Image (cartoon, rainbow, N blue to C red):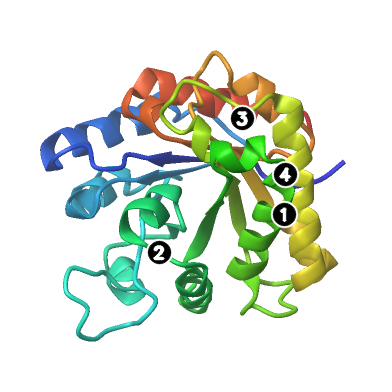
Amino acid sequence: MHNRVPFVVANWKMHMTRGPAEQLAGDIARAVADVRGVDVAICPPATALDVVGRALAGTPLLLGAQTMHEETHGSFTGEISAPMLLDLGCRCVILGHSERRQWYGETDVALERKVQSAISHNLLPVICVGERLVEREAGQTDALVTMQVEAAVGGIGDRPDAALVVAYEPVWAIGTGRTATGEEANRVAALIRWVVASRCGEAAGDALRVLYGGSVKPDNIHEFVRQPEVDGALVGGASLDAAAFAAIVRAAAERPA
């Protein structure tokens, strides 16, 4: 038994200009207005944070960003800081997504500093970890995920009060239509929880919400949220459809306690 509130995060990636983003955010808010017992965050591209924030105003849905810089200000062309996100009304931020690691060279060292910055600014970090196909086939999943989680939370210390979310997103499942089994997602989620408890204290491990991500859709979400260690989902493509995303949110809200 646990009292962790399920959490579903929409990652719109590089989709939606401001008008369609505002419309979609409103459609999602209306579609889940009657759903209770689940936290929901919408993470649009940075250019639409303002209009999506307005669309979500007065609703329980959280506004989130897809990345941020670890410093609060400085000569970092093109970057966005935690205070800037707070100014836009953001409550959470995705950090360490595999696409950021793969295409933009984001390192574990930078991720550790970003997590520290997010926590210090009361932004909920949604930390992404996961293995590539070659690593999975080599039997390196556990070692790699452990290393990524330890690096991400290494600067927090024993902080039972630090709210954390970790999303297990096997890289080979992102946008491919392939997914891990529910049992495998649960096993890795339990490993993630154990690592956080070992590094940050048992209370932090118990409170940690672990999400599954990677080709999550309405027809497979139940397989994941019925697992005792999986607390929700990080949703990519399906979050661009209000009805599909609402179905995922409803499934998460119905997970067994």
Kindly identify the amino acid type of the residue bearing the numbered disc 2.
Glu
Kindly identify the amino acid type of the residue bearing the numbered disc 3.
Ala
Circle 3 or circle 1, nearest the eye: 1
Q: Decide which of 57, 223 is in the foreground and name it.
A: 223
Residue shown at 58%/45% (left/top)? 131
Relative image position of residue 223 (x, y in whole percent): 68, 21
Tally of numbered discs = 4
Sequence-first tag of 3 and 2 = 2
Q: Secondary structure at mark 3?
A: helix
Query: Label for residue 106?
Result: 2
Q: Which residue is mark 3?
A: 252
Quadrant location of the C terminus in the rendered image: top right
Kindly identify the amino acid type of the residue bearing the numbered disc 4.
Ala
Circle 1 or circle 4, nearest the eye: 1
Q: Quadrant of residue 229?
A: top right
Q: Is residue 214 left or right of residue 183?
A: left
Q: Which residue is mark 4?
A: 189
> In this rendering, does residue 102 appear at all?
yes
Q: Which residue is mark 1?
A: 143
Kindly identify the amino acid type of the residue bearing the numbered disc 1.
Ala
Sequence-first tag of 4 and 3 = 4
